[in-house]
Amino acid sequence: MAPPVTERGLKSVVWQKIKAAVFDDCRKEGEWKIMLLDEFTTKLLASCCKMTNLLEEGITVVENIYKNREPVRQMKALYFISPTSKSVDCFLRDFASKSENKYKAAYIYFTDFCPDSLFNKIKTSCSKSIRRCKEINISFIPHESQVYTLNVPDAFYYCYSPVPGSASGKDAIMEAMAEQIVTVCATLDENPGVRYKSKPLDNASKLAQLVEKKLEDYYKTDEKSLIKGKTQSQLLIIDRGFDPVSTVLHELTFQAMAYDLLPIENDTYKYKADGKEKEAILEEDDDLWVRIRHRHIAVVLEEIPKLMKEISSTKKATEGKISLSALTQLMKKLPHFRKQISKQVVHLNLAEDCMNKFKLNIEKLCKTEQDLALGTDAEGQKVKDAMRVLLPVLLGKNHDNCDKIRAILLYIFSINGTTEENLDRLIQNVKIEDESDMIRNWSYLGVPIVPQSQQGKPVRKDRSAEETFQLSRWTPFIKDIMEDAIDNRLDSKEWPYCSQCPAVWNGSGAVSARQKPRTNYLELDRKNGSKLIVFVIGGITYSEMRCAYEISQAYKSCEVIIGSTHILTPRKLLDDIKMLNKPKDKVSFIKDE
């Protein structure tokens, strides 16, 4: 079995697998190698290890396979690449002929299944120079300890665009995504029961069928050649349109708020301290970030100054003793203090930057957004006239067009679609004619925009008894789904299985949940380390990522791992939505045949 997702979780599991499948496989005592990576494997390794880890594995230099490099003929090269024409052609150029070989020999490790056409190309060109050629089945990025991405943001366009000609791109991306999802399951050593959300579109159904077929094939032909039966885990596949609200709402938990309001790119936060421009990477190696990222901004602003005081008082206590041993202890502790204080300064800056934006114009927006999203105000009174709630935002001079569009969308979601006349009037009054596709194109995700849908909105769990901040009453839909999946309460009509359902998860199939007392599930084997793996087609939000951690904490023995094609912020999503009805050039992630 794969190790449980603890410590740095998925990142740790992936690194251990790469260590065993790649580095241990080609290790030779005292031998140093050069490592060649492509774009995808650079991201993959950066997500789960540091350069010091690679040095420990005998890697002296890491190079980009796409760039021109000087030959180092006395050294062997380790190629860790994706099975694409582009990467394979770069490898073949390095071994064009015996006299022109760049390296002494090559060890090739593909992230995923290598098509026969590419494999034969390598075989006929330079087989004598190759010491190893293997597929290791890790074709995803472990973004966080319980979050993975397939690193294919363009899949959003291909899965939801109505443009003629995008259909062939969609078939290819579906195949590629299914293969990638299988490598997630394989890395976790799981053969889960596959389920999908049956409405509003059929993407989830198609992808689920492909994943099920590929899982079956993989476990017939894995390295042990043993057919692995279904494990006690579930894989849920969902179309992005299942919860439009969580994608546009302003979130006030620290991580989600920071990525929404501040220009954080590649997890890098830029700030000023001591009059200098500084950068900090928001990553899980920073314990303080892990501790506070899912907390409400109000709690974060209270907590960081408290930690600052704790550290300074510890420092003063040590400084009070003048003995030599005390001075030695202080010298040892100073770098630790310095490191802790610098992290706290980063997060205090981050929190203050968020609050400056919040006080400027977001605070008023949040009340409107929460009332529209929930259909009730902070006192629990039903919103009778959604338009009256929306108007102050549309008339407000402090709100930019993007915030107004987000509010209009929440209004339309709250009334389950509107009339063409009403939508035109809203667009003209706010003067967003050029951006109107950010609203209209949601219909391609199966979300009612025009006309109003006659189908009722899904019933939400009553969470009124839960303690929340007034401006953070909304709970992402995915949390309900995760809880229902673990408690065996998902409706099998709405959430069909692609395969025979593992008996322990069977809440409404062959073994009826009604036939056994409600508490029985606690005694089932699945409570010993089963996993709930979630995949959303078309992006997940930071608030949805947070739910995976909250549910894992609440149901200690069932681990939730959430993933998607990529990670969303509201602005990026609206830009992508706007492009759905425009033609798009072919992109490079589609695997070569």
Image (spheres, helix red, strand yellow):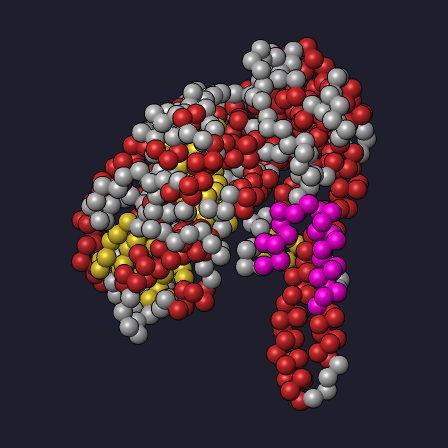
Percent from the top left, x then y, of residue 141?
Answer: 44, 47
Left or right of 194? Residue 144 is right
* Segment colored magenta: 287-311
Tell whether position 529 is magenta.
Answer: no
The residue at the point 32 percent across, 62 percent down is: 23
Percent from the top left, x then y, of residue 266?
Answer: 56, 49
The residue at the point 71 percent across, 78 percent down is: 318
Q: Mainly helix, strand or loop, the magenta region?
A: helix
Percent from the top left, x then y, of residue 496?
Answer: 40, 24
For the question of whether residue 153 can be seen, the reply is no
Tell which of 83 and 356 is nearer to you. 356
Is residue 74 shown above or below 165? below
Is residue 495 shown above or below 472? above
The residue at the point 18 percent across, 49 percent down is: 124
Occupied quadrant, residue 222: top left
Q: Residue furthest bottom?
A: 324
Left or right of 384? Residue 553 is left
Occupied quadrant, residue 288: bottom right
Is residue 548 shown above or below 436? below
The residue at the point 58 percent across, 11 percent down is: 454
Percent from the top left, x then y, of residue 259?
Answer: 63, 44
For the question of whether residue 525 can be seen, the reply is yes
For the C terminus, the quadrant is top left
Occupied quadrant, residue 321: bottom right
Looking at the rendered structure, the number of numbered marks drawn on it comes to 0
